[in-house]
Amino acid sequence: MEDLSSLSDNDLIIEARNGNDPAFTTLVYRHDRNVLSMIAHYCKSSDDAKDIYQEVFLRVYKGLKRFEFRSEFKTWLFRITTNVCLTHQASYRRYQKVSISPDEEGMNPKVEIRSPEEHEPDKQFINAEMKGDIQSAVDSLAPKQKMAFMLKHMHDYKIKEIAKMMDCSEGTIKKYLFIATEKLRLKLKTI
């Protein structure tokens, strides 16, 4: 049996495209720790992590024929991993509510994912108050920063789509989002 571990990623891709399944397996093993590490930042459930991991490498396997060697394989793989994680996170959010509640001492708000039936009246009051503070902070942003922030974080549009909607470059949208995030972080830190 041939030792594939000494081959470069590009050589392994070529081999895998030619039907060499052990070459694909070597490629997976070479990068799976980094993929798992990225996935761990996106989900808390090991079952979800396993599903995402499988989906990532299924997409890689199916898309390998279209890989054009314009970027490193690792960059392409992480782009796929990020997309799968975000897609999973977006679909998960459809079935969950995000609430903000204080810790036991009533300090240090933290974000929790809770089912709608778990809300207690006192937590609803705190959530409404915090929601008001967040809305106030968002409303204080400059109009273009606010628009970019809301399109990205409240309506889940991609930067490219936002740039088209706002008729400016993707770099400008990234700048608006960076400034908006920094302003919100400073404003909400004092609350």
Image (cartoon, rainbow, N blue to C red):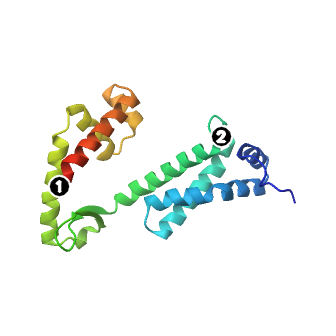
Q: Secondary structure at mark 2?
A: loop
Q: Which mark is residue 112?
A: none
**What residue sits right under mark 1 in the picture?**
131
Check the image and report above or below for 55 versus 70: below
Check the image and report above or below for 146 versus 122: above
Residue 64 coordinates in the image, percent (x, y): 67, 45
Please tell me which residue is depicted at 35% across the width and 29% down the height of the picture: 172
**What residue sits right under mark 2 in the picture?**
67
Q: Inspect the image, locate mark 1, and give the three-letter code of the amino acid beneath it.
A: Lys
Q: Is residue 11 left or right of residue 178?
A: right
Q: Quadrant of the C terminus?
A: bottom left
Q: Inspect the image, locate mark 2, and give the three-letter code of the amino acid beneath it.
A: Phe
Q: Is residue 67 left or right of residue 47?
A: right
State the CA–CA distance, disc 2 to disc 1.
44 Å
Residue 116 lies in what quarter of the image? Answer: bottom left
Residue 70 coordinates in the image, percent (x, y): 63, 34
Q: Is residue 174 left or right of residue 51?
A: left
Answer whether residue 44 is visible to the viewer in this image.
yes
Nearest to N terminus: mark 2 or mark 1: 2
Residue 156 lies in what quarter of the image? Answer: top left
Crowding at dot 1, Cα within 10 Å, few <14 / some 14-19 / many 20+, comes out as some
